[in-house]
Image (cartoon, grey):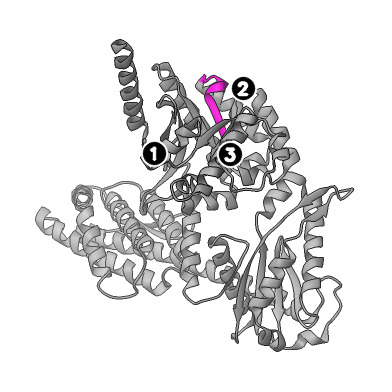
Amino acid sequence: MGTRTSTDGGGAARTTPPAGPCAEQLRRLGEAVQARAEEVLKETVAQTSKSGQQVGAPVQHSFERVCTSSTLAVARWIAGEDIEVTNEASRETSTIFGEIAAHRAASLHEVTRRSMWWRNVMADMLRGCAVELDIDEPTLSHALNMLQMSLEFSLLRVCECFESERQRTDEELTRREEELAFLATHDPLTGLPNRTLILAPVAALFIDLDNFKSINDTLGHGVGDELLTAVADRLKATVRKADALGRLGGDEFVVVADELTIDAGPELVAERLLTALKAPFKVGHSKETSLTINASIGIASGRRESAGELLRDADIAMYRAKLDGRNRYAVFEAEMQDTVQQRMQLEMDLRGALERDEFRLVYQPTLDLSRMTPTGVEALIRWMHPERGLVQPDAFIPLLEETGLINDVGRWVLAEACRQAAVWRREGHPITMAVNVSARQLDSDQLIADIEAALAEAELEAAALTIEITETTLMRNVEETARRLIRIKDLGVRIAIDDFGTGYSSLAHLQRFPVDALKIDRSFISGLKHNKEGETLIHTLVQLGKALSIETFAEGIEEDEELTLLQAEHCDSGQGFLFSRPLDADQAQTFLRGWSARLKQGAAGR
């Protein structure tokens, strides 16, 4: 019995399984290997982990995925299915290893080595199954040939991925070096040569404006360009003439410093730049719009083999500054590379989390503090990562904001929260649902449409929904924010200011917004029992709410003493671990039913 070969549309050789008795033996052999795929995976992973390059857990998981899909695909091909099953596996392998190449998580040598291990382990498995099933030598030889061809075709695609990534990296590095070379010899604003910039740079400060995209989205690109010009002028007035200031594109600026500036310290330069940006910028046709903007700065200093490496390290340090809270600077350290790489991997995973249904909502009950009865719940998002497990909100919500994914995810949260609230209200629990809205969502009228759609789809009355907005978000763009909140209020939806007391709103500003509730920040609640000033501050905030006919709401109540003091001040509502931690939907329903039962028993007793 012989072997026939043909070529697919791409010119790659492929093996056509023979007919007759050999085909039947191949089918049995392929099915036997499919049944032992998990065994192949475990042995391959064990052997490839014994030596070679150490890789992180995400990359190790990627190798395991490749082993699993490749084993099953080749086994199915041997069993008689069309070669397309291996082509699909090869494409998945290329995608996975392409990601590894893009993030430099493993070398091409390591990928090849592990692929060879997989081939060897699967070949041993084929031989073992052939002996057990009494498969003749020509049939086994044919199956091993199919295995080898699958490996070669996959490795060809992997090499193409690594080469493509190498070319892309080289082109990006060349582009950066060319940009830096221009900055080193020219004034970026006038284009005139500057002979003082011929000196080799020994420090670079990478400057990236925080949340600039939201300004473009809200006020338009014309105002955005005007702001960038104003920022450039202010930065130019701050740096020394001996230093090169340039704009790399978008809202990214760079300062290249010489020896003399190094003596003064690049950190001092960064501090001066941050201070210079603090004053508001006047933009717009009549300069009537006042904008405050912050920046994150990364610093890299010392000699590098190329100017591109210096700029790369400053860029990495800038990302570290953003991760640490923005509006600050960070100095490059070697270990930052791993942190930034992990952040990029998390961002990549986050982009598909909504489609993969990885987000969950939990619900924290809120109580009327005078009657001590539940009045509603606040919806809080959680991310169940398939590999990392539960990812805390403070690790991924800033990424949602930066990438713009917060709009899609926020839309999903609104819809899911309204759906759940409608279910509970139909079951006889007259509770309200509070949903947090981000600054990016509030920057667009799309939020109003999203709220209307969520209410309509869930058939939930508008008064049962509360939109929560932080005080800082409220003050970003007072005019547009007030207009949108009035439209939301006209729908019948309640509006609450979250973390009240931590922002910069004045009484005059507060009166411009259609606010129903003030949620007093946890930091004030925890200070109640420590000093008289804490009690005085709570008293002032509660009285402010009463004067404005606004409900007062205490966040983060954790101790009985805090509750007693808040009740004495006649604070209206509250939530916190003293009453309940955030609960999943089933737990929250049990919580509500328990309170309903107690209320009915109390009414019967009276």
In space, the residues marked 2 and 3 are separated at their CA atoms by: 25 Å
**Few, some or many C-alpha atoms within 10 Å of disc 2 (few <14, some 14-19, many ≥20)?**
some
Crowding at dot 3, Cα within 10 Å, few <14 / some 14-19 / many 20+, comes out as many
**Residue on which disc 3 sits:** 541
**What residue would you read off at disc 2?**
492
- Would you say 330 lies left or right of 200 here? left
Q: Residue furthest front?
A: 532
Mark 1 vs 2: CB contact within 8 A: no
Nearest to N terminus: mark 2 or mark 3 = 2
> Residue 466 lies in magenta, yes or no?
yes
Alpha carbon distance from label 1 to label 3 = 26 Å
Secondary structure type for disc 3: helix
Q: Residue at x 53, y 61 (%)?
A: 323
In the image, which residues are magenta?
Answer: 459-468
In this image, 283 relative to 137: left or right? right
Percent position of residue 96, x then y: 43, 58
Q: Residue at x 86, y 50 (%)?
A: 287
Circle 2 or circle 3, nearest the eye: 3
Instruction: Give, as a three-letter code, the residue at label 3.
Output: Leu
Q: Secondary structure at mark 2?
A: loop
Callout 2, which amino acid?
Answer: Gly
